[in-house]
Image (spheres, grey):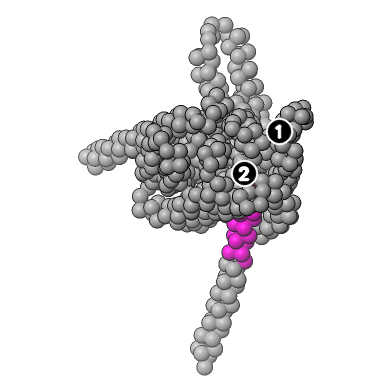
Amino acid sequence: MAEENEVRESLIGHDSSHQLAHNNNNDFSSLIVRLYFGHFLARSGARMWEFSVGLYMINVWPDSLLLAAVYGVVEAASTAIFGPIIGKLVDRLTYVQVLRLWLLAQNLSFIVAGVTVTWLLVYSGLRISGFAVFVSLVVLTNVSGAIGVLSTLAGTILVEREWVIVISNAEPPEVLTNMNSVIRRIDLSCKLFAPVASGFIISFVSLEASAVALALWNVMSVWLQYWLLKSVYDGIPALSENNERRKARFEQPVPVEISPSTSTDTDILLSRVGSTSALEERNWKRKVVGRLSQVAFFDAWIVYLQQDVVLPGVALSLLYFTVLSFGTLMTATLEWKGIPAYVIGIVRGISAMVGIAVTLLYPLVHSRISTLRTGLWSIWIQWSFLLVCSASVWIQNSNISAWMLMGGVAASRLGLWMFDLSVMQQMQDQVPPSNRCIVGGVQNSLQSILHLLSYVMGIIISNPKDFGKLTILSMLSTTLAAVLYSFHIYRVRKHLFHFEKFSLLIRWCTRRY
């Protein structure tokens, strides 16, 4: 009887602990769902603006890609210049401060942009009758859009480069892979639904209605976004614990002296700059470089260039020197060719569906081959599909050419998003936690520099008839990216091969002697 009671008590205790663990798992799962849903709401507004702005600009100034290209230059230049600063800001501020700054700035900026665009579209004659007012509205639209994109960058770094890694830190490696895939799936789902919704509003209601809908979306969703993401921070102890460690790191006094590693780097830089015959001049220059290394731009780029994943990062950035992306220039060109907005939105949605399929496929591929090889296969798959876009340049029929262009871009997303996931995971695995936000900011800055150059080419080649020239330049950039990443794979594998041979030699010598 006593044994029976002991068994019963042990069973009751086991059941109670099992029930407690089950409840904790349910709470954790609920918080992760809130993270995903909050991220979905935030990305939807950004994707809606990203798709629509090209259509707005081509209608504000018909038969020219100039306004669309100028907006692209402003947006990309702001990210290129301020990307490293955004990364350092996210690294230094608390999680709650970044969350508030991100959501307030992003939603307010897109509300202002929606209002100014509506004004430009309603009073379409301003370009002739009130040019000063027209330029002011265009400038305000560009600045608001750029601030919105910078705010989105802060949120991307916070969620994708920090929270996801902290949350999955104590879990098996496949948890991070799966969370990365879900986050990317959410982003691509926004690329699917937001353009389709905007395209239907533009085609069957009006452009003005879509701009008003954009502003209203940001007004209504900002409070829900903040509540969802703040509850995630409050409910997951690992986030608050890591936040306290970050604060403690920056509260420590910083020594004035230059560290040995910085001094070494400085000596190398100085040896390349000029003569170091006089010791006083050498010390003066060392102080100058030391001061420069404290500037956000210089210091952040030094950190980035010291990473082992710099070549994959550069290869990924080269893919942004392109017009083959359903971005502002390509969307405006398709509109000029007579493709309805809802058709563009549907095809862009199909390309997003291809990307969503990639997020389901990536964990399977990643589990069978290494992250490096996944990136290698994916970059060349993208290159192969973009050959269809290159072929469209020589097709005389405008309608067939447009469909080949859209089809090639949509299919190439299979390789693009898998390559993006591969490079992101390499950075998550190989970049030290103290440098994660900084490297993320510089990576986005580098991508924006290349994206900026594509818009500069759009200003130089602003006639939609010459879009084929931009297509060829984009193809060359993709080819260079594939070659660079292939070289990285060769270099890493060769290094590992020699290391294995060296290890075998050491073992043989140890056994022999």
Circles 2 and 1, Cβ within 8 Å, touching? The answer is no
The residue at the point 45 percent across, 52 percent down is 354
The reply to whether residue 326 is in sight is yes
Mark 2 residue type: Ser
Q: Position of residue 136 (x, y in %)?
A: 75, 31
Tell me if mark 2 has few (under 14), some (14-19) or many (20+) residues whose alpha carbon lies within 10 angstroms of its own.
many
- Which residues, given as a range, are shown in magenta? 27-45
- Look at mark 2 in the image and give the residue it sits on: 52
- As drawn, the label of residue 15 is none
- Judging depth in this view, the residue of 185 and 499 nearest the camera is 185
Three-letter residue code for mark 1: Val
Residue that label 1 marks: 138
Residue 99 percent location from the top left of the image: 69, 48
The local secondary structure at tag 1 comes to helix
SS under mark 2: helix
Looking at the image, the residue that sits furthest to the top is 277
Classify 243 as above or below 236.
above
Real-space CA distance between mark 2 and mark 1, rounded to the nearest whole angstrom: 15 Å
Q: Earlier in the sequence, mark 2 or mark 1?
A: 2
Instruction: Please tell me whether residue 458 belongs to the stretch shown in magenta.
Output: no
* Left or right relative to 16: residue 234: right
